[in-house]
Amino acid sequence: MNEQAAAEHLQVIRTLMERSAVYRRALAPIMIFAGLVGTTAAGFGGVVQSATGFVLMWFGVAAVTLIGALLLTRQQALKDAEPFWSPPTRRVAQAMLPALVAGLVIGICVLVVFAKPGPADPPTGSTELDNLIWLPAAWAVLYGCALHAAGFFTPRGLRWLGWLNVLGGVAIFLGIAIADQVECPAWWSHALMGLYFGVPHLAYGVYLHLTKQGKNVA
């Protein structure tokens, strides 16, 4: 690493530390927005019974959440007269990217598998989602890893949120491993998505909003 790169690296770290309060304030509306979108989608998700529909629906929810988060971030940057795509922002995005890409690829693989010719209909009384309870758990673990990575550049509460997702996803995998059967009602998958990607975001966002004037913790 040359001197210029080292100096830039140190400057980014210093900026991230100095702006902890700013990022904490900016996270509040983003988390509330993500929580509302995720919780609402889970509430209406029961109408989607197919695996492909499930993946496409939650890909759409993720896209809406991402666009909303970017717009809120841009609004905050304009308000503070700062560049939107700053070096600290790039560091956070780069830290989250590997786990998020892995989650995207897993979802695409599920789409490909269920797009192949197979049995015309699932057994009576069941749906494609009955055996797909592992997918929300896998997404939760990967998303938790992304949040944990971002938490090293932002308020530490984000790392705790990441751990919550990781442990929640691991708990489902443990349940699958020790259960006699893994077939669950289709609505469970949507409920888990709301539990992983809706409620915690909403709670954390409200917490940040209510404490933004207090001591800069979490």
Image (tube, rainbow, N blue to C red):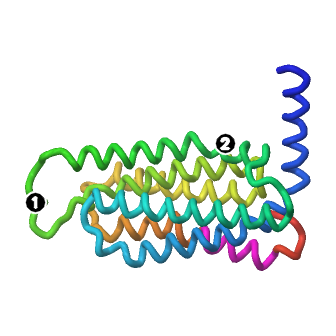
The residue wearing badge 1 is 121
Closer-to-camera residue (27/83): 83
* Residue type (three-letter) at the residue carrying disc 2: Ala
Whole-percent x, y for residue 205 in the image: 68, 72
Secondary structure of residue under mark 2: helix
Give the answer, above or below, for where 143 lies relative to 46: above
Q: How many marks?
A: 2
Quadrant holding the C terminus: bottom right
Q: Which residues are magenta?
A: 201-211
Horizontal placement of 189 versus 217: left or right? left
Q: Amino acid at mark 1?
A: Asp
Q: Quadrant of the N terminus?
A: top right
Identified at 83% across, 73% down, the residue is 212
Where residue 121 sits, quadrant-wise, is: bottom left
Look at the image and say whether residue 53 sits in the magenta stretch. Answer: no
Tell me the residue that label 2 is attached to: 95
